[in-house]
Amino acid sequence: MDDFVWNKLTEWGLTEFIQKFQDEGVDEESFLCLDDDDIVKLIPMVGPRAKFKRRLKLLKENTMNQETADLSPQCQQEHEGAAGSAQASPSTSNTSGRGKRKLDLQGEPSKRQSPTTKQRRGTTPASHQEGIILSDVKKIMSCVQRKLPKQDNKLNKFLKDTISDLETDKRELVGVFGKTGAGKSSLINAIIGEKNLLPSGALRACTSVIIKVEANMHSTKYEAEIEFITKEDWQEELWSSFNFFNDNADPENDQENDQENDQENDQEDDQEDDQVVDSDDDAAEKLSAVYGEEWKDKSPENLMEGKYFKEVPEFLPSKKKTLKCESAEELSAKLAKYTRNGSIDSDSEEVKRWYWPLVKCVTVRVPRNDLLQHVTLVDLPGNGDRNKSRDKMWKEFVGSCSTVWIVTEINRAAAEKEAWDILESASSLMGNGGECQQIHFICTKSDHFGDSDDYSAAAVRALISKRNMRAKEEVTKEFRKLHKVKKHFSEDCFKVFTVSSKEFLKKKRLTPEETELPKLQEFLRGLNDSHSETLNYVSGAHGILSLIQGASCRDVAGRKADVCKDLEENMRRELDKVTKPMEKAYKTFEECLSEGVEKSKRSCQRDLKSVLYPFQKGKKRGFYGILKCVVENNGTHKPKNRKQINLNAKLASHLTDSIDEEFKKTFPNQSKCGPFNGVIGTFSLDTKRLIEKYKDVELQLIFLQTEEEKMKTTLNNKIRKTKKTIYRSLTETIGETMKECYQTARGFKGPGSLKKMRSAIEDHVDYSKDTMFEQARDVMLSQLTDLKEYILKTLEDTLQKSIELSLKIDGDSLPDVKEELAEVKKHYEALQMKKTNVA
């Protein structure tokens, strides 16, 4: 059975006949062709059959009217003529539909609807019909909530709170990485069907601002919400930049660096000089964007005056700025000065200042976009940011993405160093330190083909297809070499797509399927998972109504005592089952971390030198500035367009290496696997068996069943978030211990300061190594113990409370909800059947 038939029967209140239609193999086409004899066989009861026949007739009429409305006036006349002929000659009755499809295929590309325009006019049947179910059940629960007694005793309060908590807006984050020019903006625009939403081409994309793209389900406007960094952050950045300029302008420091680094080679000399220049240029670029050339003769205090922020009055009081527009193009133009960099490569006179250095995050909302209803696309900078608040937000987003898209041009995808650097540097944040389940490597501009005029259209298409296959093979081979990444992700998590946003829209040489954009759209539809959202809500509502109706039964007191005893015995047994694998995991982590501690002690000085003395021979200038940035930022520094330096992570690397494999097994990101070998998922009070045994308290047991499922989902979500904190605790504890020497190193200036900074760090590590790594281990083990205790307490307390509410408290004053329960039960069973059929 397809979605169309299931949805129609559900919408028309005929869910009891779904199984019959499925058994008879009725799909959308045959559904619309059913005659009277077929309908009698499928629906033997007169009442439901009459309802079905009337609705089927209306459906056929609406379908005919919609097809006619979609045609041009001339085509409508032809369509009407064909309809008239159809009455005289049945054999031609379906030609109008074929004519319409032919017109769609041959129409001008610019006049065709975008994919999401079609979607908005006719949302996929499943999501549309389930939306009707969800709306219906929400209305029922709202009415029930109003009917509940006003007095707030324990049961009434629980029911009111639980009904309010039924609705949750679960959002999936898809992180999109890629350097400027890789085609990120065009890709996102094409996928969501908004050609002019994210600008591309004329202005250079800012590499700092995080841009979220999601649906606006409450308005037809295109909206953007701009969140700024705090004025304190900006003031700190000003001071840091000015100090950096002054320090690197000191000839005595340069001379000192010449003497200290006479063992470093000339080839790597250029690379390191580039990092210093990058840091210098990066700071100057930010200041010039906001202040023009005025900053060069001003102090940091002067540059915080209100006159510089007249165009962004929201910045100093730390308020968000909201933009609302009628079109994507208008919003894109208004957003340019907050998300793009025109200070270097734009000669536009309209924008005098560019405020991206002050912006932390921009949320763009697209009206009524089905693909983004429960999905947020996050356009992320490559490797974090020098600004602390932006870097913190970057890490939070990277750690919260369920999927990551790495975007690069196809012509050198396998050799694109920046793309692989992003993947390697962020792998621990996405994997064990995050929630990422899938990595999609997206090769853009697959339609670009040199000298294509020398070939026929068919030959070009074949050559593009061949190159796409080769690119996929080469990229997959390259992924297999990334041992650091594969500690966190298996090859099953990695997929390669070769896409062309241009061809997807214009369809000159490739079909939409060959551009692979539809595959990514289908992936987003799967993430939206409207069926899951509806089923979760309806399931919860079914449980609550079962509790209300069952609570008023007063003639089963003895049976309630018996079932309570069985439930509590089952709970004790199941809690024991949960405890054992958690204790086993703790012991394994303890052993792994102890080995990591010993290795860290032996290797810490060597690890330290790889950061403090990164070169071997030759003469070098400028490392003072880089190390200064590292200590200013408590052990981390993000040079522009280069890998992040993270001294704390380097020192913690043997600890994280020691647990990576075990951590991935214990806390898998894949939803089909559960934490601690799936022990939470298998936890059960065995309510199904008890329903058979205690039929007279079936309603109470149904409530317990739904509460159990809800609790397990909540627990798994909590574990997924907590495991990120646990994993990152190793590096963060090391960072806390190192803060003292960073503080000391910051104070050194003038000749000899580079040597003093190095010595301060080396001496601190040498002094702390006997306790620092053991402390990191103990903190992590302590957090694991806290998690174990939280899980056991939550399981026991939640279920004990649910047992008490459903079986030990009478609901004398509760309303009769028999009719509401029957209606919701019908929806629930239909949704469960749908879930089973899909599985």
Image (cartoon, rainbow, N blue to C red):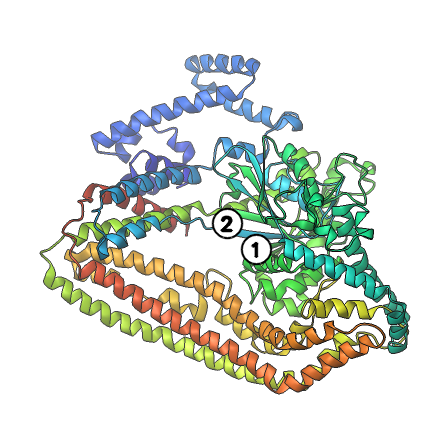
Residue 589 percent coordinates (x, y)? 51, 79
296 vs 80, left or right, is right
Residue situated furthest left in the rendering: 555
236 vs 91, left or right, is right
Q: CA distance from mark 1 to mark 2?
A: 10 Å
Mark toward the start of the polypeptide (1 vs 2): 1
Residue 413 percent coordinates (x, y)? 73, 54
Dot label at residue 403: 1
Could you tell me which secondary element the residue under label 2 belongs to?
helix
Dot label at residue 289: none
Residue, disc 2: 527
Q: Is residue 611 above or below residue 129?
A: below
Residue 613 percent coordinates (x, y)? 79, 76
478 vs 277, left or right, is left
Decide which of 576, 645 is in the foreground and name it: 645
The amino acid pointed to by label 1 is Thr
Assess whether mark 2 and mark 1 are in contact (beta carbons under 8 angstroms): yes
The amino acid pointed to by label 2 is Leu
**Picture residue at 50% right of the left edge, 34% below the top:** 219
Q: Is residue 26 visible?
A: no
**Picture residue at 56% right of the left edge, 56% below the top:** 401
Could you tell me which secondary element the residue under label 1 belongs to?
strand
Q: Residue 716 appears in which quarter of the rendering?
A: bottom left
584 vs 434, left or right, is left
